């Protein structure tokens, strides 16, 4: 039986044979935010189904392919679709692609997601820089035997979201006139949206936005010493903030509306990372 390290090596070798060069940055595109990948120059598309040992993406609004291309001359890879715990994958499976990215030679990561706004000053369409996170998934992708080839048993999470990347994002947003909020992102298992009582609890915990992804990926990336930038797109106000039900189609629709700002900010940040 091959272990995760050997499987990730095989997948990385496969990608090396398909891509023009090793990308400098991996960008993970959240629900409704996939359009960024279509703005890369000289794109090479790799369907997830072709990558050895990779799970397939099952969520509406997620393509399930990687697009490698150039942003202002810099080679980057964008994941159009990620893997969620609620799809039934283990967190190890859901974050496997990050093990692959690291073995391919990628050290920089941008994680994006669609999130519900908890802080009453957030509005749908806002972009929120992730300053820190709270793991409410009651699971951790590093559970089980530790493989020292990837990283230490007890990785530090003090600066999970890279301070200098955060500074770059703030500076570039200000320069471009794109409003960028900031706050703490809390991740729950999903796939049901939260109840108003859960949102009151999560607000009391100190979170500003809530979603169902990103946290396992940040943990795995930090385990391997990758530097992480996180950006949430606030697609709706969380349950109970407004008396309005939440549905996935609205989440996708708001993602499309902010696509122009979001894409512009990503290119500007990539240039300086
Ligand atoms: N919205 C979202 N909760 C929400 O309210 N996109 C994820 C989780």
Image (cartoon, rainbow, N blue to C red):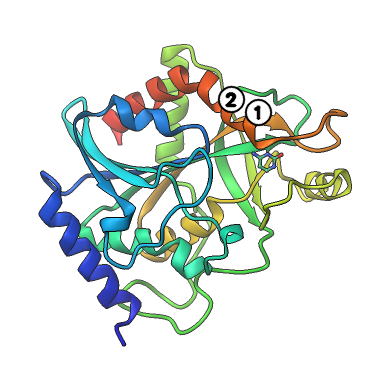
Give x and y (percent) for residue 271.
Answer: 27, 29
Q: Residue at x 73, y 50 (%)?
A: 192
Image quarter hosting the C terminus: top left
Residue named by callout 2: 253
Does 173 sit above or below residue 11?
Answer: above
Occupied quadrant, residue 95: bottom left
Alpha carbon distance from label 2 to label 1: 5 Å
* Mark carried by residue 81: none
Does 242 sit above or below residue 257?
Answer: below
Label 1 beta carbon less than 8 Å to ligand 1? no
Give x and y (percent) for residue 45.
Answer: 24, 41
Total labels drawn:
2
Does 126 sit above or below residue 251?
Answer: above
- Pointers 2 and 1 in contact (C-beta within 8 Å): yes
Q: Residues within 10 Å of mark 2 (few under 14, many from 20)?
A: some
Identify the element where label 1 is drawn. helix
Does 95 sit above or below residue 231?
Answer: below
**Residue 21 visible in image:** yes
Give x and y (percent) for residue 188.
Answer: 68, 55
**Residue 225 visible in image:** no
Residue named by callout 1: 250
Occupied quadrant, residue 215: bottom right
- Looking at the image, residue 179 sits to the left or right of residue 260; the answer is right
Q: Residue at x 48, y 55 (%)?
A: 83
Q: Residue at x 10, y 44 (%)?
A: 20
- Looking at the image, residue 190 sits to the left or right of residue 142; the answer is right
């Amino acid at each position: 039986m091959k272990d995760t390290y050997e499987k990730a090596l095989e997948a990385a070798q496969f990608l090396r044979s398909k891509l023009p060069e090793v990308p400098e940055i991996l960008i993970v595109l959240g629900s409704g935010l996939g359009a960024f990948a279509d703005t890369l120059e000289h794109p090479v598309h790799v369907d997830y189904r072709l990558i050895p040992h990779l799970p397939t993406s099952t969520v509406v609004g997620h393509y399930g392919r990687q697009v490698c291309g150039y942003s202002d001359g810099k080679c980057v890879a964008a994941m159009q679709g990620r893997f969620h715990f609620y799809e039934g994958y283990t967190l190890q499976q859901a974050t496997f692609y990050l093990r692959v990215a690291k073995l391919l030679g990628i050290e920089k990561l941008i994680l994006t997601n669609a999130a519900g706004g908890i802080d009453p000053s957030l509005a749908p369409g806002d972009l929120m820089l992730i300053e820190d996170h709270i793991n409410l998934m009651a699971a951790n992708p590093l559970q089980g035997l530790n493989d020292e080839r990837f990283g230490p048993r007890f990785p530090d999470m003090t600066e999970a979201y890279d301070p200098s990347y955060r500074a770059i994002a703030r500076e570039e947003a200000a320069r471009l006139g794109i409003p960028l909020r900031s706050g703490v992102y809390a991740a729950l298992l999903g796939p049901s949206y939260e109840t108003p009582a859960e949102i009151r609890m999560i607000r009391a915990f100190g979170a500003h936005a809530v979603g169902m992804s990103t946290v396992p990926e940040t943990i795995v990336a930090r385990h391997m010493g990758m530097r992480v930038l996180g950006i949430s797109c606030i697609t709706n106000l969380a349950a109970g903030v407004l008396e309005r039900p939440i549905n996935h189609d609205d989440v996708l629709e708001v993602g499309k509306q902010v696509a122009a700002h979001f894409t512009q900010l990503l290119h500007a940040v990539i240039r300086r990372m």
